[in-house]
Structure formats: structure tokens, C-alpha cells
Image (cartoon, grey):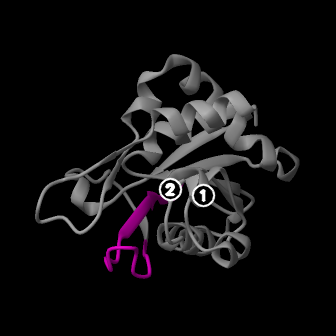
Amino acid sequence: MPAELRERLVELLRWIDPGPAATHLVSDISGWWRDPEVLAALGPALVEPFRAARPTVVVAPAVTGLLVGPLAATALGVGFVPAHKPGDGRLPAGPLTWAQSPPDFRGRRVDLAVRERHLGPGDRVLVVDDWVATGAQVRALYDICAARGAEPVGTAAVAVDCPPEVAANLRIRGLLTGTDLHG
């Protein structure tokens, strides 16, 4: 990945204090989406470590994964499958394959679903997301792949802030690390 992209991603990241009731700062990554040069560079940078694995499809979870997922799919020249969450307000019609994540950094278990007709045996799946803090949603997406007979080849994320052993186990590669994010 070009050093300029890494520097720009860090520069555009903001930490926001949500108020007196909050126990921690909240990341604001909206600057990534506003910068056209960053937007153009994200897809190719995310997929580069996985090109040799020859993914046939990119899967990404709602909500912000739906921004970076299509960028990665376009860079690979493959299709994109969104993973939906029931809390997003609208689930797609038709048969869905569901999985529930282990507890995430807030202790929540997240339900994810993909349309069955878009993922199946023979698919080599690259999971893509903007930020991986625990790997919980990645695990749920890998479970969906297994249920559909698809093979996850790994996960590409803009920011990887999970423990190194989790990243290694789930084959997660990121453009930024916890050190980049927190200084």
C-alpha cells in the first residue's frame, strides 16, 4: 500500500467525545468517504494481499462494509454480496442464510444474513469491512460461507484493531493497525 494512502487515512480519522455519559471516544471515519483520492485508492489497496487467492466474490457487512465492499469487488473484477443485519430496517426478500457473531467489543451478538442465491459452493469469498475490532462479525460471515459451501480466503479491512492472534487466525489484513489508529 502506498505510504501516502496510510498517512491520509490516519489524517482523516477523527476521535469524537460523544458526551459525559460515554466511556470512550468514538471513531469518525466519514473523512475517508469524503476524500475522492482515498476512495479511489481503497479498493485496490484492500484487495492487493488477496489477489493470488483468486476471490470470486466479495462479502461485506452492513453498514459501512457496504461502502468498501463494492470498491474491493470492483478492484478485483468480481461481484459483491451484502450481509444484512435485522436492525438495518429492511431485510431482502427470499431465502437467507443467517449466522450470529460471538460477542463484539460492546458485548453484542450481531445477526448477519446473505441471500442464499448469491453465495454457494465454489465461491472463494473475500470478506471486506472498514474496521475490525474483535473479529466477531468476520467469524459470523465465515460461518455463513461454511453453511453455503463457500470458502473464505481471508478478510481485508481498512483498520484492524483486534489482537494479532485473532487477525492471524482469521487471515485478516488491514491498511491500518491499532498503533496507527491510537498513536
Disc 2 to disc 1, C-alpha distance: 5 Å
Residue found at the very far front of the displayed protein? 183
- In the drawing, what numbered circle is on residue 182? 2
Residue 49: image x %, image y %? 80, 48
Q: Judge whether 112 appears above or below 41 on screen.
A: below
Residue 65: image x %, image y %? 46, 47
Q: Quadrant of the N terminus?
A: top right
Tell me the quarter of the picture where residue 7 sits: top right
Tell me the quarter of the picture where residue 160 sits: bottom right
- In the drawing, what numbered circle is on residue 43? none
Residue at x-position 59% and y-position 70%: 142
Residue 32: image x %, image y %? 47, 32
Crowding at dot 1, Cα within 10 Å, few <14 / some 14-19 / many 20+, comes out as few
Q: Is residue 126 left or right of residue 36?
A: right
Cβ atoms at labels 2 and 1 below 8 Å apart = yes
Instruction: Say whether residue 109 is magenta.
Output: yes
Q: Which residues are magenta?
A: 99-117
Crowding at dot 2, Cα within 10 Å, few <14 / some 14-19 / many 20+, comes out as few
Q: Is residue 115 left or right of residue 170?
A: left
Instruction: Say whether residue 171 is magenta.
Output: no
